[in-house]
Amino acid sequence: MFSSFKLKFSQLFGFLIVPLFVCSQPLLRVAPELVGIDSRRLQYADSAILNSISIGEIPGAVLAVVCKGKMAYLKAYGNKQIYPSILPMEVNTVFDLASVSKSVSTAISTMILVERGQLRFNDRVSMYIPEFQGNIRILDLLTHTSGLPSYARVDSLQKRFGSPNPAGLMEYISTCDRHFAPRDSFQYSCLNYITLQHIIETISGQSLEYFAQANIFDVLGMEHTNYRPQGATLDRVAPTEKQADGGVLLGVVHDPLARVMNDCNSGNAGVFSDADDLAILATALLNGGAYNGKQILSPQGVRVMTTVPDVLKQFGRTPGWDSSSAYSSNVGDLLSLSAYGHTGYTGTSLVIDPDNDLAIILLTNRVHPEDKGSVTRLRGVVANVVAASIDTVSNE
């Protein structure tokens, strides 16, 4: 009862103070050459994306290239909707980020608590979830080295707990079979980040949805980034998969665990955003955690969050991002070794390269309308084109 009151009180208090932090200021848009990028080479990215559309891999896309704190390229391709009617893609289209949510919301929220002295990487999960079994620590969750299963059968969870039932989902995760001992191996798992969500909420007394909004999105002025888009943001959303009733998911998270079992407020998926807002976040991370005079993380926090820990070098995962694991194909072949990123099942991708002061944002809704599209190869191709477009001669 007390924790419920604490949650409601902190949300109410937060809503009173959040507007003081909102300061929307999109990145300055400049010609690519002004930041040392060859616009002629970027046309190869246009061709690759248009080809992917023509062969039916994706209905459309938005590509944004951020360099030196400026928007050097922002372009829309194809359509954001092809069923039940056709609607053209626009550069301000809002996308279901799917698992990119893990990085831009859950991981950053975790790091904020670490910086505030409320959490340590080496803390056992059982400190915050007493019924949680095994010697799994916070770092293991962040880097997918915990041994938790990759996912959970939603139909089985519904039968056992009903839906939505976040408490039941957490009960399942706390006691389910572990596939290996912590740090013995790597297995990408949505359950890791749902567990982190529960820890964030336990410590803060707030929902992850609210905590991320108040401490990340609103601070940076990311006006069209949230878990449950409404109003003008909802009007911009690209639909995802066709449903049994003939409609499409629109403004509701595609991921079944997040949607069905976790009430759309989930650590593994659920954030909606657009290219302009993600460009702001990427710029903040490239700038030591700050943008437009607002700080979400310290430079030390950003460095640790985006660096593979020495004890886990063989797995290629940082505390919240992908560096060189089997899931990092979106980084491509030509970016620096310091590049990191994340992808989302719906067709989204964010890549950040500190050495080149560069970010590549490729947003698609490849699951629209029937979850048959593919974007894995396209992500790497686009990253390679953008990396090759950096004019090193003019930058010397």
Image: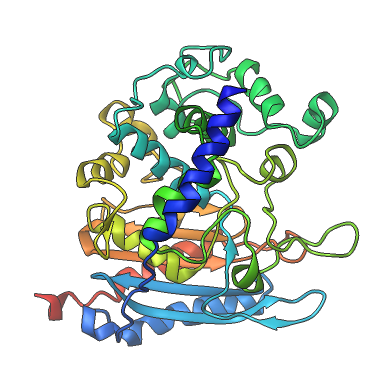
Location of residue 260 in the rendering, given as x and y in whole percent from the top left corner: 75, 42
Q: Quadrant of the C terminus?
A: bottom left
Extreme-left residue of the structure: 396
Instruction: Work out whether residue 324 or residue 255 is closer to the camera in this orientation and state it.
Output: 255
- The reply to whether residue 353 is in sight is no
Question: Residue 328: where, in percent of width, then height?
Answer: 44, 49
Q: Give the percent coordinates (x, y) of residue 227.
A: 59, 53
Way the structure is coloured: rainbow
Location of the N terminus (image quadrant): top right
Residue ID at (79%, 35%): 163
In the rendered view, would you say 265 is above or below 226? above
Q: How many marks are shown on the rendered structure?
A: 0
On screen, residue 72 above or below 16: below
Q: Nearer the viewer, residue 5 or 59?
A: 5
Q: Quadrant of residue 248?
A: bottom right
Q: Nearer the viewer, residue 320 or 178?
A: 320
Q: Where residue 286 sits in the image (x, y, percent)?
A: 26, 58
Question: Would you say 330 lies left or right of 288 here?
Answer: right
Residue drawn at x 57%, y 81% is 90
State left or right for residue 244 relative to residue 22: right
Q: Residue furthest right?
A: 245
Decide if residue 278 is in sight here: yes
Q: Residue at x 76, y 66 (%)?
A: 369
